[in-house]
Amino acid sequence: MSALILRMKPLATPRMLLVIAALVVAWCGLWEAFSIANVLSGVVVAVVALAIAGPSTAGRTVHIGALLQLLWLVLVDLFRSTAQVVWEILTPVDYTDEIIIGIDTKADSSAHMLLLTVSITLTPGTAIVDINTTTGRLYLHLLHADAAPHVIKHVERLAELACRAFPTADPISGPSSGPSFEREGTAT
Protein backbone atom coordinates (compact mmCIF):
# COMPACT_ATOMS: atom_id res chain seq x y z
CA MET A 1 0.00 0.00 0.00
CA SER A 2 2.85 2.41 0.79
CA ALA A 3 4.33 1.80 -2.68
CA LEU A 4 1.04 2.98 -4.21
CA ILE A 5 1.09 6.12 -2.04
CA LEU A 6 4.68 6.84 -3.09
CA ARG A 7 3.69 6.37 -6.72
CA MET A 8 0.77 8.80 -6.33
CA LYS A 9 2.69 11.51 -4.41
CA PRO A 10 4.18 13.17 -7.55
CA LEU A 11 0.61 13.67 -8.82
CA ALA A 12 -0.04 16.33 -6.16
CA THR A 13 2.21 18.98 -7.77
CA PRO A 14 0.61 22.02 -9.39
CA ARG A 15 1.83 20.87 -12.82
CA MET A 16 0.31 17.41 -12.43
CA LEU A 17 -2.95 18.87 -11.11
CA LEU A 18 -3.06 21.00 -14.25
CA VAL A 19 -2.40 17.90 -16.38
CA ILE A 20 -5.12 15.98 -14.52
CA ALA A 21 -7.56 18.86 -15.07
CA ALA A 22 -6.73 18.93 -18.79
CA LEU A 23 -7.20 15.16 -19.04
CA VAL A 24 -10.55 15.41 -17.23
CA VAL A 25 -11.71 18.10 -19.67
CA ALA A 26 -10.62 15.88 -22.57
CA TRP A 27 -12.43 12.91 -21.00
CA CYS A 28 -15.64 14.92 -20.63
CA GLY A 29 -15.21 16.12 -24.21
CA LEU A 30 -15.07 12.52 -25.38
CA TRP A 31 -18.34 11.85 -23.58
CA GLU A 32 -19.74 15.17 -24.87
CA ALA A 33 -21.05 16.13 -21.43
CA PHE A 34 -19.82 17.60 -18.17
CA SER A 35 -21.55 15.59 -15.49
CA ILE A 36 -20.52 14.56 -12.00
CA ALA A 37 -20.08 10.97 -13.19
CA ASN A 38 -17.92 12.02 -16.16
CA VAL A 39 -15.77 14.33 -14.05
CA LEU A 40 -15.24 11.71 -11.33
CA SER A 41 -14.51 8.92 -13.80
CA GLY A 42 -12.20 11.30 -15.69
CA VAL A 43 -10.26 12.00 -12.51
CA VAL A 44 -9.93 8.27 -11.82
CA VAL A 45 -8.78 7.53 -15.39
CA ALA A 46 -6.32 10.46 -15.36
CA VAL A 47 -4.80 9.52 -11.99
CA VAL A 48 -4.48 5.85 -12.93
CA ALA A 49 -2.92 6.72 -16.31
CA LEU A 50 -0.43 9.13 -14.72
CA ALA A 51 0.39 6.68 -11.93
CA ILE A 52 1.10 3.94 -14.47
CA ALA A 53 3.17 6.32 -16.61
CA GLY A 54 5.34 7.17 -13.61
CA PRO A 55 7.01 10.43 -12.73
CA SER A 56 8.16 12.71 -15.51
CA THR A 57 11.72 13.98 -15.78
CA ALA A 58 10.38 17.40 -16.72
CA GLY A 59 10.37 20.35 -14.34
CA ARG A 60 7.61 20.44 -11.79
CA THR A 61 6.71 24.13 -11.75
CA VAL A 62 4.07 25.98 -13.70
CA HIS A 63 4.33 29.74 -14.04
CA ILE A 64 0.71 30.83 -14.20
CA GLY A 65 1.46 34.36 -15.45
CA ALA A 66 3.39 33.10 -18.47
CA LEU A 67 0.77 30.39 -19.08
CA LEU A 68 -2.04 32.96 -19.09
CA GLN A 69 -0.06 35.19 -21.47
CA LEU A 70 0.47 32.20 -23.78
CA LEU A 71 -3.22 31.25 -23.70
CA TRP A 72 -4.26 34.86 -24.36
CA LEU A 73 -1.85 35.15 -27.28
CA VAL A 74 -3.14 31.90 -28.82
CA LEU A 75 -6.76 33.01 -28.35
CA VAL A 76 -6.08 36.38 -30.01
CA ASP A 77 -4.26 34.56 -32.84
CA LEU A 78 -7.23 32.29 -33.32
CA PHE A 79 -9.68 35.15 -33.75
CA ARG A 80 -7.37 37.38 -35.80
CA SER A 81 -6.25 34.68 -38.22
CA THR A 82 -9.79 33.34 -38.63
CA ALA A 83 -10.93 36.83 -39.66
CA GLN A 84 -8.02 37.10 -42.12
CA VAL A 85 -8.79 33.73 -43.72
CA VAL A 86 -12.50 34.58 -43.95
CA TRP A 87 -11.55 37.85 -45.68
CA GLU A 88 -9.35 35.93 -48.13
CA ILE A 89 -12.23 33.60 -48.93
CA LEU A 90 -14.81 36.36 -49.37
CA THR A 91 -12.72 38.71 -51.52
CA PRO A 92 -12.84 37.96 -55.26
CA VAL A 93 -9.14 38.74 -55.84
CA ASP A 94 -6.48 36.35 -54.59
CA TYR A 95 -4.05 38.40 -52.51
CA THR A 96 -2.08 35.44 -51.23
CA ASP A 97 1.66 35.29 -51.77
CA GLU A 98 2.53 31.95 -50.22
CA ILE A 99 5.88 31.26 -48.63
CA ILE A 100 7.54 28.61 -46.49
CA ILE A 101 9.73 29.95 -43.71
CA GLY A 102 12.11 28.24 -41.34
CA ILE A 103 12.25 29.53 -37.77
CA ASP A 104 14.83 28.54 -35.19
CA THR A 105 13.00 28.50 -31.89
CA LYS A 106 14.62 28.65 -28.53
CA ALA A 107 12.37 25.89 -27.23
CA ASP A 108 13.98 24.17 -24.27
CA SER A 109 12.46 20.73 -24.79
CA SER A 110 10.44 18.48 -27.02
CA ALA A 111 7.44 19.24 -24.78
CA HIS A 112 7.82 22.93 -25.62
CA MET A 113 8.05 22.09 -29.31
CA LEU A 114 4.81 20.12 -29.01
CA LEU A 115 3.07 23.00 -27.24
CA LEU A 116 4.39 25.44 -29.83
CA THR A 117 3.29 23.20 -32.70
CA VAL A 118 -0.22 22.85 -31.30
CA SER A 119 -0.45 26.62 -30.70
CA ILE A 120 0.54 27.38 -34.29
CA THR A 121 -1.61 24.64 -35.81
CA LEU A 122 -4.71 26.02 -34.08
CA THR A 123 -4.51 29.26 -36.04
CA PRO A 124 -5.90 29.29 -39.59
CA GLY A 125 -3.62 30.59 -42.34
CA THR A 126 -0.46 28.93 -41.06
CA ALA A 127 0.54 25.32 -41.33
CA ILE A 128 3.57 23.50 -39.98
CA VAL A 129 5.32 21.80 -42.87
CA ASP A 130 8.20 20.19 -40.99
CA ILE A 131 9.87 20.16 -37.59
CA ASN A 132 13.48 19.45 -36.75
CA THR A 133 13.26 18.33 -33.13
CA THR A 134 17.02 18.12 -32.69
CA THR A 135 17.57 21.79 -33.50
CA GLY A 136 14.17 23.25 -32.60
CA ARG A 137 13.62 24.51 -36.16
CA LEU A 138 10.06 24.84 -37.48
CA TYR A 139 9.07 25.19 -41.13
CA LEU A 140 5.81 27.07 -41.62
CA HIS A 141 3.66 27.67 -44.67
CA LEU A 142 2.21 31.20 -44.70
CA LEU A 143 -0.44 32.67 -46.97
CA HIS A 144 1.25 36.08 -47.06
CA ALA A 145 5.01 36.45 -47.58
CA ASP A 146 5.01 40.02 -46.28
CA ALA A 147 3.87 38.72 -42.87
CA ALA A 148 7.00 36.57 -42.46
CA PRO A 149 8.97 38.97 -40.19
CA HIS A 150 5.94 39.42 -37.94
CA VAL A 151 5.30 35.65 -37.83
CA ILE A 152 8.94 34.95 -36.93
CA LYS A 153 8.80 37.36 -33.98
CA HIS A 154 5.43 35.98 -32.98
CA VAL A 155 6.59 32.34 -33.01
CA GLU A 156 9.68 33.32 -31.02
CA ARG A 157 7.37 34.99 -28.47
CA LEU A 158 5.17 31.87 -28.29
CA ALA A 159 8.27 29.71 -27.73
CA GLU A 160 9.56 32.04 -25.04
CA LEU A 161 6.21 31.98 -23.21
CA ALA A 162 5.98 28.18 -23.50
CA CYS A 163 9.46 27.84 -21.98
CA ARG A 164 8.64 30.29 -19.19
CA ALA A 165 5.26 28.70 -18.44
CA PHE A 166 6.61 25.15 -18.21
CA PRO A 167 10.35 25.14 -17.39
CA THR A 168 11.95 21.73 -18.03
CA ALA A 169 15.30 20.00 -17.98
CA ASP A 170 14.90 18.22 -21.37
CA PRO A 171 17.03 20.44 -23.62
CA ILE A 172 17.01 20.52 -27.38
CA SER A 173 20.48 21.15 -28.70
CA GLY A 174 21.66 22.10 -32.11
CA PRO A 175 22.96 24.93 -34.21
CA SER A 176 20.86 28.02 -34.71
CA SER A 177 21.25 29.63 -38.09
CA GLY A 178 18.35 32.10 -38.06
CA PRO A 179 15.21 32.19 -40.15
CA SER A 180 15.11 31.08 -43.75
CA PHE A 181 12.56 31.74 -46.47
CA GLU A 182 11.41 29.62 -49.38
CA ARG A 183 8.98 30.45 -52.14
CA GLU A 184 6.88 27.56 -53.30
CA GLY A 185 8.85 25.57 -55.81
CA THR A 186 12.21 26.96 -54.64
CA ALA A 187 14.63 26.01 -51.93
CA THR A 188 17.20 27.94 -49.93
Image (tube, rainbow, N blue to C red):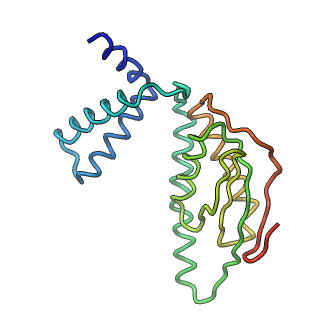
Q: Is residue 1 above or below residue 73?
A: above
Residue sitting at the far bottom: 92
**Residue 61 position in % (x across, y down):** 53, 25
**Residue 156 position in % (x across, y down):** 70, 48
**Residue 145 position in % (x across, y down):** 73, 71
Q: Is residue 75 above or below residue 88?
A: above
Residue at left offset 73%, top offset 54%: 103
Residue at left offset 18%, top offset 43%: 35
Residue at left offset 29%, top offset 45%: 27
For residue 39, what is the image quadrant? top left
Residue at left offset 72%, top offset 76%: 184
Quarter of the picture containing the C terminus is: bottom right
Foreground residue among 9 and 67 = 9
Quarter of the picture containing the N terminus is: top left
Foreground residue among 5 and 117 = 5
8 to the left or right of 134: left
Q: Count how many numbered circles sit on residues in the image.
A: 0
Residue sitting at the far left: 37
131 to the left or right of 67: right
**Residue 155 position in % (x across, y down):** 66, 52
54 to the left or right of 138: left
For residue 126, what is the image quadrant? bottom right
